[in-house]
Image (tube, coloured by chain):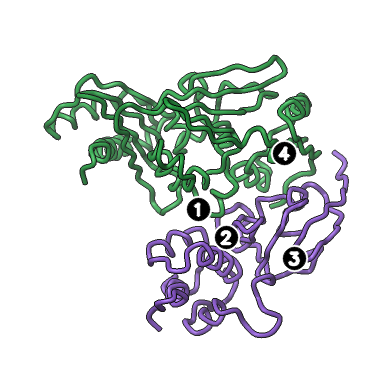
């Protein structure tokens, strides 16, 4: 089977890109190796760990289970897209304040999942936060500090 | 952990998809949440992927008086969130909430789950429980199969290689349908699960998560005493053959059926 390339046009973090890809390349690999957006991490490549979570038209998806050719014509958002040019976003500040990361490998996926949740539901209860984050594995924190950080974003706040 | 090279075809109509599927070694790419991990492990090596995500005519949700009609491309998260589905068939929304995780449900499709036929999956079992019909289109035309006839065994269906699942028709149940499953971690496939329908004094139980496919059993009359009901579960579940190492699942199946029965009755 010839590994033929084709050109796809996609929008990443609001910026249009034209990129030559092989159909077998995952979106995660194309983001990292072709577009230089290394904020998206690749953990398990089987859809389990959630480190590669990005948004496809605003919805969280696994970028290791989506081929880059499939993203043609769609809007992709990565962790770079929810990070201000200077400093940190309010959610990133909350992660910092609550020690919601140690090695940082899962953090981009955690941030994108949590940010997507908060945009849909600005005041989620703890069970809702935990349910949303079940698809993102973290081997450092034991999750409690991540949950605390997300809960602190509610208008009523959370425990600091 | 990278798939082998394949030829990629993005179909925009059912006809295009079916034509592209005539190529030997071709496979349908719907949500990709089961297929792509298998490809990443190289357990699956299709020579061609026919991407049906752009087939607009397969994404419909239609609630009728007695049935719910769903296109094969309806995503699991739509089953969870769609207000019409939640109102007309709440057990479908509840069961779909247990599929994988949020980022899996936003991509995973009803048709993909049906065609993949994992015996531990929630949706194929619900289709069997409700007596759904599955519409498939191939080079010979369209045919409709009952869920019972469609699911043949472990990851095995009546689907021919160049056929495509296009739509599912779910009759709205007359009785109350309960749902319970046992999982090690939220989002995992079920070790054992059951749908129980209570209609008048009888109904049916459909088990999944053990054996080679979902199995449905009618019950003419539920005993009112829980101990007598336990005997019913024990008798029925023995009709589902399981491997030696899965013998413990009979116990789980009995427990989960009773919980599902109570769920259908609105009891805790």
A37 w.r.t. B244: above or below: below
Q: Which-is-in-front pick, marks 3 and 1?
A: 3
The reply to whether callout 2 and callout 1 are in contact (CB within 8 Å) is: yes
The reply to whether callout 3 and callout 1 are in contact (CB within 8 Å) is: no
Disc assigned to residue B101: 1
Q: Which residue is drawn at 65% across and 62% down?
A: A42
Separation of marks 4 and 2 at Cα, in angstroms = 23 Å
Q: What element carries label 2?
A: loop
The crowd level at tag 2 (other Cα within 10 Å; few <14, some 14-19, many 20+) is many
Q: Which residue is drawn at 44% across and 48% down?
A: B97
Disc assigned to residue A14: 3
Circles 3 and 1 on the same subunit: no
B125 w.r.t. A160: above or below: above
Separation of marks 2 and 3 at Cα, in angstroms = 23 Å
Residue at mark 4: B51
Which comes before the other along the chain, label 1 or label 4? Answer: 4
Judge from the rendering whether residue B86 lies leftward or rightward of residue B258; answer left or right: right
Viewer-proximal residue, A125 or B185? A125
Q: Which chain carries label 2?
A: A
The reply to whether callout 4 and callout 2 are in contact (CB within 8 Å) is: no
Q: Which-is-in-front pick, marks 2 and 1?
A: 1
The reply to whether callout 2 and callout 3 are in contact (CB within 8 Å) is: no
Q: Which chain is purple?
A: A
Residue at mark 2: A50
């Amino acid at each position: 089977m010839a590994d033929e390339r084709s050109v796809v046009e996609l929008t990443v973090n609001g910026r249009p890109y034209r990129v030559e890809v092989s159909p077998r390349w995952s979106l995660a690999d194309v983001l990292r190796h072709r577009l230089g957006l290394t904020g998206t991490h690749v953990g398990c490549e089987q859809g389990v760990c959630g480190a590669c979570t990005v948004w496809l038209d605003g919805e969280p998806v696994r970028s290791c289970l989506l081929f880059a050719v499939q993203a043609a014509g769609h809007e992709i958002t990565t962790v770079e897209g929810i990070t201000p040019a200077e400093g940190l976003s309010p959610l990133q500040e909350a992660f910092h304040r609550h020690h919601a990361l140690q090695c940082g490998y899962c953090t981009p996926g955690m941030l994108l999942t949590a940010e997507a949740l908060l945009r849909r539901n600005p005041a989620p209860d703890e069970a809702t936060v935990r349910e949303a984050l079940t698809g993102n594995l973290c081997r450092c924190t034991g999750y409690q500090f991540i949950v605390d950080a997300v809960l602190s974003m509610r208008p009523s706040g959370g425990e600091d | 952990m990278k798939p082998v090279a394949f030829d990629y075809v993005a179909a925009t109509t059912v006809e295009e998809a079916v034509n592209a599927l005539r190529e030997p070694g071709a496979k349908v790419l719907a949500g990709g949440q089961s297929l792509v991990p298998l490809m990443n492990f190289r357990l699956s090596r299709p020579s061609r992927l026919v991407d049906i995500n752009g087939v607009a005519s397969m994404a419909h949700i239609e609630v009728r008086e007695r049935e719910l009609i769903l296109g094969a491309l309806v995503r699991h998260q739509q089953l969870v969130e769609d207000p019409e589905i939640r109102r007309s068939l709440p057990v479908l929304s509840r069961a779909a909430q247990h599929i994988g995780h949020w980022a899996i449900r936003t991509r995973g499709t009803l048709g993909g789950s049906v065609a993949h036929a994992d015996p531990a999956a929630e949706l194929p079992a619900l289709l069997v429980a409700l007596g759904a019909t599955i519409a498939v289109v191939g080079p010979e035309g369209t045919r409709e199969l009952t869920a019972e006839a469609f699911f043949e065994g472990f990851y095995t269906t009546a689907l021919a290689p160049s056929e495509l699942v296009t739509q599912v028709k779910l009759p709205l149940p007359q009785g109350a349908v309960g749902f319970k499953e046992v999982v090690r971690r939220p989002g995992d496939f079920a070790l054992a699960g059951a749908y129980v329908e209570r209609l008048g004094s009888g109904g049916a139980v459909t088990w999944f998560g053990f054996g080679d496919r979902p199995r449905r059993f009618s019950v003419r009359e539920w005993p009112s005493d829980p101990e007598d009901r336990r005997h019913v579960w024990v008798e029925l579940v023995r009709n589902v053959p399981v491997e030696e190492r899965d013998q413990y699942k009979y116990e789980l199946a009995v427990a989960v059926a009773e919980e599902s029965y109570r769920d259908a009755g609105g009891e805790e």
